Amino acid sequence: MRITGYRALTTVQDWGRPVGDANGVFADGVVRVPLLLVETDVGVTGVGIGSHVGVEEVFTAVEGEDPRAVTALYDRMLRRTFKAGHAGAVFGTIGALDTALWDIKAQVAGEPLWRLLGGRDRRVPAYASGLDIALGDDELVAVHETYADRGVRSAKLKGGLDVGRDRDRLVLVRDVLTAAGRGARPGLMLDVNEALNRKQAVRHVAELERVLDLTWVEEPVRRWDAEGHAVVGRGVRASVASGENLTGLEQYRPLLAAGAVDVVQASAGWGVTHFLRVAALAHAHDLPVSPVGTTPVGLLHAATSVPNHLVSELQDLHPPVGVSVGHHVEGGAFVLGDGPGLGIRVDEGAIPAPHRPAAPVPGGPHVRPERAGQRLPPVGDPDRPDPLPS
């Protein structure tokens, strides 16, 4: 069996409402989703969700190879990008190809990937992540009631711009999840997407902790700032989570050496092999690992096979346009299917034609604001100096 070609497509995730974070918002809720389909000479096609950047060069590392040698091919792709470096969007292309190869390998074996990787339990615990910074109170409550109807009892909110607003929104979501759980304490997380500096992050979270018990604060400072993450971790009760934007094990080493993270994250866009290696590295430091991503199918399968998986991000309850998945969400977990491979199917005819080319998007949460991390906001709300009752 040999790899013969690929097809690059771009579909969309249509949230039906504004989505974004502290860095910006997609007002129409339509987010581009790149896909890579890898073809073989036996008619089996694998699907990877991730970048197309540099795919022409990266693909030459796997063309004509047996896709079942997936981990060796992963390293071959890294070596092919040695001079320019594999970081950034190119790492996403490697990850998409890697995920597609794992899909092929499991399809050929006639097993779901979670079974092929040695998983025992098809259920993967989930937390809600609605990319909800632009929502008003009523819509925020309604969105999390929908998650709660699927049994989800933990949620991560986007914030970091206004501590009073973050407090109010976290309280609203806490109350929704507490009611749904019949009084059980929910998990609450805050993701500021690198919008703060060290002092701001400590003050911001410490103010929230006057009222709330946060499970973790995510990316409180710049992704590479090991000392800054450690400073935040020492200054707050919440755990510090980070890693979704790190592209390679070498980028994790300084943070782990500094004791800077409590929850090690990896993005679905970086591929299955990367996640498995990150999980092993985290496990060697007695740390849990948590996948992040809009449609993290490959990492959900991989999560069943690692001993330190904590919880996986559940964003939109619907897959991208033209994509179907073989899992569903119930009882607060992703429930993986029995079909061979990842269970992803792509209906190319259903992908809107205007979204097939990879047109650039001028604004949104992928563009860092000019003054990010340079604000000096007050911590308290002058109109309400006392914390809300818990």
Image: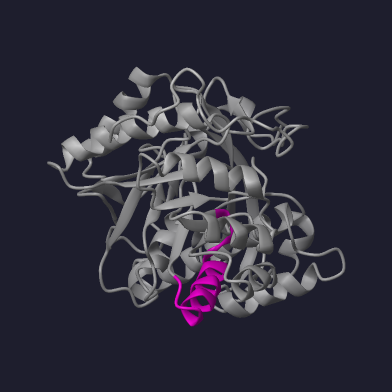
Relative to the observer, which residue lies in front, 169 or 201?
201
Q: Which percent across, then down, holds residue 97?
A: 61, 61
- Side of 156 where 12 appears, left or right: right
Relative to the observer, which residue lies in front, 275 or 78?
275
Quarter holding residue 304: bottom left
On screen, residue 176 above or below 206: above
Q: Which residue is drawn at 51% across and 57% down?
A: 241
Quarter holding residue 139: top left
Q: Which percent across, then down, holds residue 356?
A: 63, 34
Q: Which percent across, then down, holds residue 150?
A: 23, 41
Relative to the observer, which residue lies in front, 220 or 145?
220
Residue 292 visible (yes or no): yes
Predominant secondary structure in magenta?
A: helix
Q: Which percent across, then down, holds residue 231?
A: 61, 59
Relative to the observer, which residue lies in front, 241 or 306?
241
Point out the image quarter for the C terminus.
top left
On screen, residue 147 above or below 55: above
Hey, which residue is sitting farthest left in the picture?
A: 182
For the rendered model, the colour scheme is one colour
- Side of 85 where 369 appears, left or right: left
Residue 14 visible (yes or no): no
**Residue 44 forms part of the magenta stretch:** no
Q: How many labels does the image show?
A: 0
Q: Which residue is drawn at 72% across and 71% down?
A: 78
Tell me the magenta residue range.
269-287
Q: Residue at x 86, y 63 (%)?
A: 84
Q: Which residue is drawn at 57% across and 72% down?
A: 67
